[in-house]
Amino acid sequence: MSVDRRTQIMDAATKSFSMFGYKATTMDQVARIANVGKGTIYTFFANKEELFDDILQGVIAEMKRITEQKIRKDQAFFENLYDALDGLLEFRVEHELLIKLAQEVREFGTPQAREAMQRVENAILDYMERQVEHATIQGEIREVDAKVASFVLLKLYITLTLEWSKQHDPMDKDDIKSYIRLFFAEGLLPK
């Protein structure tokens, strides 16, 4: 029964954070949505921050699962990278909690929402860093600082997929891939 209540509370909290954001979500609200007493929540979570952290850890774990599904050993580094980034971007754009947190950061600058979005980005960067290091060891790309390369790749990808379309017609995935190859990949390929 405890596991069911905990899951019920987590589901209700995810719904509340996704609808109202971090700042506007209260434990009373979560209790109402979960149809439990507020005290029941405190048997599982010390406070709103702990509850939110558990939910965010679940989101990050789901993102890791998505990237692992996209990686194919028979594909080259950049193809795997494109596939993984496409999967992560689709997840991030479609996931209601991440959409609401990004909106909350833009509109209110809520520190907890900003920190959550940074944790999500850091999880992506950690994953990319490992992939860059692996590709370097395999000789698919030349030796580079994996942290810098991952950061630039992610920012370029986000810029071409999200930022560009705010002022121009959106690019399709093949165009984005060709520009990443033009600006970045051709400089990393072994000589």
Image: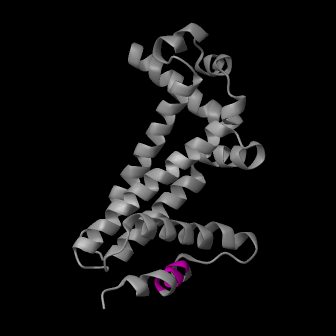
Q: By what rule are the colours in the image chosen?
A: one colour
Residue shown at the point (49%, 65%) measured from the top left: 151
Instruction: Please indicate whether residue 36 sits to the left or right of residue 188 in the image.
Output: right
Image coordinates for residue 154, horizontal then vertical, percent: 51, 66
Image coordinates for residue 22, horizontal then vertical, percent: 66, 34
Instruction: Please indicate whether residue 78 sits to the left or right of residue 87 in the image.
Output: left
The quadrant of the picture occupied by the N terminus is top left
Which residues, given as a range, are shown in magenta? 176-181
Residue shown at the point (62%, 37%) measured from the top left: 112
Image coordinates for residue 91, horizontal then vertical, percent: 52, 54
Instruction: Please indicate whether residue 161 sits to the left or right of residue 153 in the image.
Output: right
Q: Is residue 180 magenta?
A: yes
Q: Is residue 159 magenta?
A: no
Q: From the viewer's perspective, is residue 73 above or below residue 27?
A: below
Near-viewer residue (164 or 136): 136
The number of callouts visible is 0
Q: From the viewer's perspective, is residue 103 above or below residue 178?
A: above
Q: Quadrant of residue 100?
A: top right
Residue shown at the point (33%, 65%) measured from the top left: 131
> Magenta segment, principal secondary structure?
helix
